[in-house]
Amino acid sequence: MKLFNIIVALLALTLSACHSVEEYADNPRGNFEALWTTLDEHYCFFGEKGVDWDDVYLRYSPKINDKMTDEELFEVCATMLEELRDGHTNLSSSFDVSYYRRWWSDYPQNYDARLIEEHYFNFNYRQSGGFMYGILPENIGYINYSSFSSAIGEGNLDQVLYYLSTCDGLVFDVRDNGGGNLDNVGKIIARFITEPMLAGYIQHKTGPAHDAFSEPYPFYYEPAQQGRIMWGKPTAVLVNRSTFSAANNFVSIIRHLPNVSIVGSTTGGGGGMPFTSELPNGWGIRFSSAPILDPMGNQTEFGCEPSEGCSVDLDPVAALEGRDTMLDFAVALLLK
């Protein structure tokens, strides 16, 4: 059973967990109450974030009045959601979408796509199924995967890995990868493993209490089918703070393979599966509702750290000279 299908089934349990759904009026007060209550009953990281949601209600509820405009209501609700410090939590209207940006905006970007395309490949790189790839002068393969929303077929993977098969190692770059389809995580991991692998655990809410969770439900990834091109050589996975959601999940799994090192800075996290709901006025609300744990049972909401001794940033002075210090570090590590 695919991970996506497992998550959909668990989320269906999450939002039908043992309590009735209250109806709210389509006015500022009703929409505010619906928003606060939906998060109160279904959001999954109150404990990890140290957020007192009742206190949040006491501070924001007095700001609501029946004469406020939609824009004013949106501003109050969006600011309230920022208390969760969660990049998976958004409020969507016809005129704006709220988004908590400080999970990445307070950190160095540590990535410049053109720097690699121009100075490492002279714009002579290949592209296939969401991958930008090529062979570096040191005979190290390089793959950049910018989004797990980009389709990657089994045939694409075979062609790319076959092309890189004579290389001595591989840099797999997921910097600035904001996530996407979790099924693509398993599809790529399958090329790095030769036996079934425990990939992590999922939990779902069992009731409205903030600590009402199911036991962790394990999920596994299988190796690619016989005849597919596999990769077993040393690999360095490049990450930055904007490695988020499904990309963060990918890092939390592949880091446990013996020939893989995580190089760069701590990822952005996003360890909860987002779900969407709707307010009485039609505004959409997206929020983290089901924690996804790593193979060791640890939360990854706050990100995954680089491997020991592999923490490195992009030096802006070196970048002006055409060097990506994070990529150079990864290549040197593989050459050892």
Image (spheres, rainbow, N blue to C red):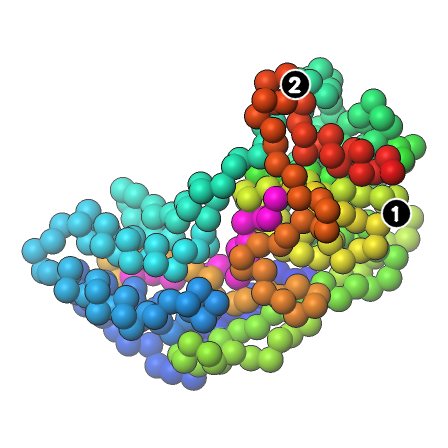
Amino acid type assigned to the residue bearing label 1 in the image = Gly
Residue 215 vertical placement versus 150 (above, below): below
Residue 148 in percent (x, y) is at 62, 45
In depth, the one of 201 and 84 nearer the eye is: 84
2 vs 1, front mark: 2
- Residue, x 22% and y 54% (percent of image)? 76
Separation of disc 2 and disc 1 at Cα?
30 Å
Residue 165 in percent (x, y) is at 89, 35
Residue 4 vertical placement versus 138 (above, below): below
Q: Would you say the residues marked 2 and 1 are in contact, meaning their CB atoms lie under 8 Å apart?
A: no
Instruction: Report the residue marked by disc 2.
Output: 322
Amino acid type assigned to the residue bearing label 2 in the image = Gly
Residue 214 vertical placement versus 328 (above, below): below
Secondary element under disc 2, as helix, strand or loop, is loop
Q: What's the magenta region? A: 265-279
Residue 83 vertical placement versus 112 (above, below): below
Q: Is residue 137 left or right of residue 287?
A: right
* Residue 174 appearing in the image: no
- Residue, x 23% and y 50% (percent of image)? 75
Q: Which mark is residue 93?
A: none
In depth, the one of 320 and 58 nearer the eye is: 320
- Residue, x 83% and y 55% (percent of image)? 258
Instruction: Report the residue marked by disc 1.
Output: 232
Residue 105 in percent (x, y) is at 44, 41
Does the magenta run of residues contain 224? no
Quarter where residue 297 is shown: bottom right
